[in-house]
Each structure stands twice: as C-alpha cells, then as structure tokens.
Image: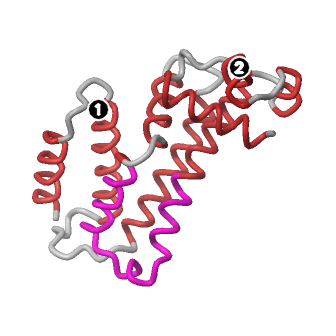
Amino acid sequence: MRARLLEATLELIAEQGWAQTSTLKICQRAEVSRGAQTHHFPTKDSLLIAAVKEIVARYQQELESATEQPASRERSLEGLFDFLWDACFEGNLLNCWMEVMVAARTDDALRPAVRETDVNAIESMRALGARCEAHGVPTKFSAADLTELTVYLLRGMVVHRGVHVAMGDKQRLFKIWKTLVL
C-alpha cells in the first residue's frame, strides 16, 4: 500500500505538477482510503517528502545500475554526460524532481528535505564523474566539477522543456557544451 501511494504521488506530480497534487487525488489514484494514507503518511508533507526521497533513490539506482555494467567501469566523461542526458529526458523522474525543487523554494516544510536529498544526489553524481576517464579535459577543471555543471545544465533544460517541448535546440546546445568542456 505504501508503494502504491508513492507511485501514485510520483505519477500525479509528473502529470499535474506539485501544486495540483493533493492527498485526495493520490488516494484515488492509488485506490486506497484516506485512512490508509494517513496510517502510512500522517500528513501531506510526510507523503510528499517520502515521494521526494523515492525520486532521488530511483534516479541514483538508475545511475548505479548503469555504472555497474562491466563496460562502463572505464566510462569516459562524455559517456557519463550522454547517460545523464538520457536519464533526464527518458521517463518522468527528473520532471518530478524539478517540480519538487521549485516547490521547495517557497515551502518551509519541504525545503530541508529537498536540500538534504539534493546535496546527497549531487555528491553521488560528482563521485561518478570523478571515476570517469576525462580524456582531453583541461587540468584546471575536475571531472567531478564538470559533471556537477552538466547536471545543472540538464536540469535547466528539463525545466525549459516544460514550456518549449521541441528537443532540437536542447540537443544542439548540449553538443556545444560537450565540445566546450571535453
């Protein structure tokens, strides 16, 4: 039941946005009673914060699964950037995360959980970058820093996609970014 509630929360955030996601809609989507929801998550904030943690856990699981492949142990920094691109634009996890980050800007209850979760996620991605071969990367830039900057660039592109759906310009700009830093 807990998993159904979290899944319904993530689906609704991706479809309708953070502001339009209510516990009533979540319960209806998960096909659980309000009482069952409050048993697992006493408040709306507790449910939404659990969903935040689920978003990042799933994203990190995708990253770890990809880097556990034997062929990826010697992954180039460019390969990691391409993987991050795919992770951002396939599926809804990053859409959900962007919704949550924007909401945390003005939500005092949500902000600490999002901040902590985001710091952990960025550190994980920096560690992945640091393990990559950085052929041709100028020595004044660390692979970890370039990975973090790439994550921020991609996050902006995900937000941009909310208004400008076409991917052509984003793909063109991402290629330019890789040419500049790799």
Q: Nearer the viewer, residue 100 or 116?
A: 100
In the rendered structure, the answer to whether residue 137 lies left or right of residue 45 reads: left
Q: Position of residue 150 (x, y in %)?
A: 29, 51
| Three-letter amino acid code at the position of disc 2 | Thr
Label 2's element? helix
Q: Nearer the viewer, residue 101 or 25?
A: 25
What is the quadrant of the C terminus in the image?
bottom left
What is the quadrant of the N terminus in the image?
top right
Label 1's element? helix
- What whole-number distance in Å separates the C-alpha atoms at marks 1 and 2? 27 Å
Q: Position of residue 84 (x, y in %)?
A: 35, 56
Q: Earlier in the sequence, mark 1 or mark 2?
A: 2
Q: Nearer the viewer, residue 178 or 32?
A: 32
Q: Which residues are magenta?
A: 59-87
Q: Residues within 10 Å of mark 1 (few under 14, many from 20)?
A: some
Residue at x 80%, y 28% (from the top left corner):
32
Q: Nearer the viewer, residue 149 or 48?
A: 48
Q: Position of residue 7 (x, y in %)?
A: 65, 39
In the rendered structure, the answer to whether residue 24 lies left or right of residue 172 reads: right
Residue at x 84%, y 23% (from the top left corner):
33
Residue at x 39%, y 74% (from the top left corner):
131
Residue 69 in the magenta stretch? The answer is yes
Which residue does the numbered mark 1 point to in the structure image?
Answer: 161
Which residue does the numbered mark 2 point to in the structure image?
Answer: 23
